[in-house]
Image (tube, rainbow, N blue to C red):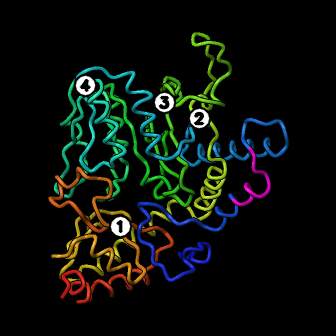
Amino acid sequence: MNYKEDFPMLNTDIIYFDNGATTLKPKCVIEAMDDYYCNYSSNAHRGDYKISIKASSELEKVREKVRNFINADMSDEIIFTQGSTESLNMIINGYFKNKLTEDDEVLITKSEHASNILPWFELENEINIKVKYISLTEDHTVTIDNVINCITDKTKVISLAQVTNVIGDVRPLKEIIKYAHEHGILVVVDAAQSVGHINVDVKDLDADFLAFSAHKMLGPTGVGILYGKYELLNELKPINYGGGMNVSFASPDKIEYKELPYRLEPGTQNIAGIIGFGRAIDYINKIGIDNIEEYCINLKEYLVNKLKNINNVKMYNADIEGSTLTFNINNIFAQDTAIYLDKYNICVRSGSHCAKKLEDELSIKNTVRISLYFYNTKEEIDKLVKALDNDKILEESLGV
């Protein structure tokens, strides 16, 4: 795969290995957003004039594209949000806050993103639920047996990333969800790192709720998706209120809200972003999600084999199949490695990666992360390895 010409950012000397944070945008996405701003910039579902009707139509076309992309039953199950973080907060504060009671248990892991931990922590502080951790294996992954061993008669929710953003493991969610449902437990899926990278079928998974972001799959920032089974989503109480979601509000006791999905989409949506997201889905579909997954798996294997030849590299998830590699250079602070690589125009992530609880498992707080996507190449990896296999990194970091 080589799609460099489609991405303006790649027509420079940048090597971009931070796709887990956000992906680059192809020209077709940028052009679709420009087209909206230049030719029919107006509010959606508000006006009776042609350009507003077009904006409304284009927005709803994207809703249907998302439905097809994740194989939801109906477009009414697709809610536009600002991103995975808002989607997860809506799920937790709009649904589970009204369903859970004191001492009910929610199962997560220590390798979850902050967006799938902090809202649950806040809910524990507010209504005294209990947040508990599913044990991880020695390679920091989740097994169905470990999930089963953590479930009690008080377990009401399991909330997990489908693919984690540091270790990069793909969880056995289909098995977990099947077992959970057999025991009356609902499952929330953080799919920010999976949709756009692997095939995600919400009906096959039987997911109750699922959240993801456009910007991690070629789309613009500021757009996300909240999926929920209709009967559950219909009970989710809005956490924001405003225009576009109501039929009437004569008085506090005479408020009538719209049906799904509009009841959960108050205010003006990020129309340009949503339209751009639709074009990103088209682009991914043209390549093929299975082709993207296979390419990234093979590219990571190539990366791991190359880094094995560098004596001072410690990898934390080399044996995990996927597109993410987390590592450190011995005796060098992770941020120093990232700053050093930036001198070669190589962009990597360093720090705790919004997964601060994972340090309990890794026994280290900060790491360097390389997250690959289909526009990365072996040639780029070779340049990375050449930069790392160099005494300069040690000299610059230690100031010698």
Question: Which residue is pictured at 54% across the width and 77% down the height?
Answer: 10
For label 2, count other residues whose C-alpha is less than 10 Å away and answer few (under 14), some (14-19) or many (20+).
some
Residue highlighted by disc 1: 349
The kind of secondary structure element at disc 2 is: loop
The amino acid marked with disc number 1 is Arg
Percent x, y for residue 149? 18, 37
The amino acid marked with disc number 3 is Ile
User: From mark 2 to mark 4, how far is it between C-alphas?
Assistant: 29 Å
For label 1, count other residues whose C-alpha is less than 10 Å away and answer few (under 14), some (14-19) or many (20+).
many
User: From mark 1 to mark 2, how far is it between C-alphas?
Assistant: 33 Å
Residue highlighted by disc 2: 265
* In this rendering, position of residue 321 left or right of residue 46: left
Residue 38 magenta-highlighted: yes
Q: Main secondary structure of the magenta part?
A: helix
Figure quadrant of residue 397? bottom left
Report the span colored magenta. 34-42
User: From mark 1 to mark 3, how far is it between C-alphas?
Assistant: 32 Å
The amino acid marked with disc number 4 is Asn
User: From mark 2 to mark 3, how far is it between C-alphas?
Assistant: 10 Å
* In this rendering, position of residue 327 left or right of residue 209: left
